[in-house]
Amino acid sequence: MRVLDLGMVWAGAMASKFLADLGAEVVKVEGGSHPDSTRGSWPPTARIVYADDDPGTDPWNRTSLYLERNRNKLSLVVDLRDQRGVQVVKALAKVCDVVVENFRAGVVDRLGIGYDSLRQMRPDIIMISMSSQGMTGPEKSYGSFGNNLEQSGGLASFTGYRGGDPLSLGVQFPDPLAGGIAPGLVMAALRYRRHTGKGLYIDLSQRELTTYSIGEAFMDYSMNRRIWEPMGNRDRYAAPQGCYRCRGDDRWLAITVQTDEQWAALCRVIGRLELAADPRYASAEGRQAHHDELDRLIGDWAATQDAHHAMQVLQQEGVPAGAALDGKNVLEDPHLVARDFWERVQQRSGGVRRHMRPPFLLSRTPAVTRSPAPRFGEHNRLILGELLGLPEAEVKSLEAEGVVEDVPRWAAEVPGLDYRPRQAPAQSPDVL
């Protein structure tokens, strides 16, 4: 299966990354003047992470966001503002099974590479659009990021502290939601095509997906006219629940009690058996009503404990608990290490680094990193010459006139950089 990847940033890039992990040949398409924003910009901003905090002479190939989201892909850089570039992408779509894109509604149509256009050349093509608002409706042309969609999707109305303002989750939450569900939709469409011989268009709205993930809140309003409000670390059903400071520097432990049996077990672990017999705490309702005092009691115990050891003891007693981990802790976590979650990958520009493998294990077809994220335009000649069969003279013409590039246009602003195209050799990489 071959995928034409027009996905950018996170949602689209993640969807195509999963497809690549599962064995698809994925061609990532960017423009010299409009590269994937995860490649960064010049001058570098403080939020961009480079290998060894060094932008190097090719910073667009060294950002953590780009490297993490684009393994196992080929890179083609072509100017879609030029009709010759559009024709290249159309020719590529003709030999692809699936197209992934996450622009706002109308962008690919204006470029001439929307679904209606592409299916004229390949009737059985499958295309998934992952726009923020969906492809129809009065707000379809709105641009959004995950933070905006948390708000408009309703999620932020009950995240944050009790009585406080709506808070973002700190990550672009709708993006990985969409990126995670999209491969399943593509697989369903491929199955449909196998049975019918017909292509399919998938309109996935990130805003609707955000709302869909918290459906109970809206059902509660629909049935009871009750509006959910922020609760901090607490839960509507479990009590007590919280994240408690432990011994050491900024160490925390999350605990959730869902049943009376778990409550009794927690009381045993913290050495307060009398609490299990106290009628005030005998039911979930009672524990909810006295949550503040329970937080103080549990907090006093947690302050004397090592977070990881306390987690293990509570888990052995059947109480859901988890130590709060930061980046360093996660990289060193013995459970993840035992499951070979971390792969050592030789990056194209940045040395050998630890990367996450896919978050699933397949018994017969393990998903592995076959190749690191490609350099900008690394496979231009491979795709144009070998895959599309363009004559050498035409390829050289596209290069000479800037329709095909291997350095972002903004690279001209980088002091000391020799801003000349550096075409990658045309040999086939491991992913082909």
Image: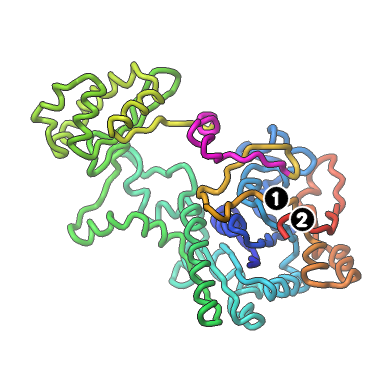
Quadrant including the C terminus: bottom right
Whether 310 is drawn above or below 359: the answer is above
In percent of the image, x 77 and y 69: which residue is there? Answer: 387
Q: Nearer the viewer, residue 202 or 277?
A: 277
**Most extreme residue toward the top, as rendered?**
304
Image marks 2 and 1: residues in contact by CB distance under 8 Å? yes
Is residue 111 at all visible to an observer of this figure?
A: yes
Q: Nearer the viewer, residue 181 or 395?
A: 181
Is residue 163 at all visible to an observer of this figure?
A: no
Separation of residues labelled 2 and 1 (CA atoms): 8 Å
Where is residue 326 shown, x and y percent of the image? 49, 31
Instruction: Please say whether residue 330 is one of the residues in the magenta stretch.
Output: yes
In percent of the image, x 34 and y 16: which residue is there? Answer: 304
Instruction: Please say whether residue 281 is one of the residues in the magenta stretch.
Output: no
Which stretch did the figure color magenta?
Answer: 328-347
Quadrant including the N terminus: bottom right
| Crowd around label 2: few <14 · some 14–19 · many ≥20 (10 Å) | few
The reply, left or right, for residue 275 in relation to residue 42 is left
Write down the residue under mark 2: 429
**Most extreme residue toward the right, as rendered?**
393
The reply, left or right, for residue 352 in relation to residue 424 is left
* Type of the residue with mark 1: Ser
Write down the residue under mark 1: 371
The reply, left or right, for residue 288 in relation to residue 6 is left
| Crowd around label 1: few <14 · some 14–19 · many ≥20 (10 Å) | some
Where is residue 201 shown, x and y percent of the image? 52, 74
Q: Secondary structure at mark 2?
A: loop
In percent of the image, x 64 and y 83: which residue is there? Answer: 120
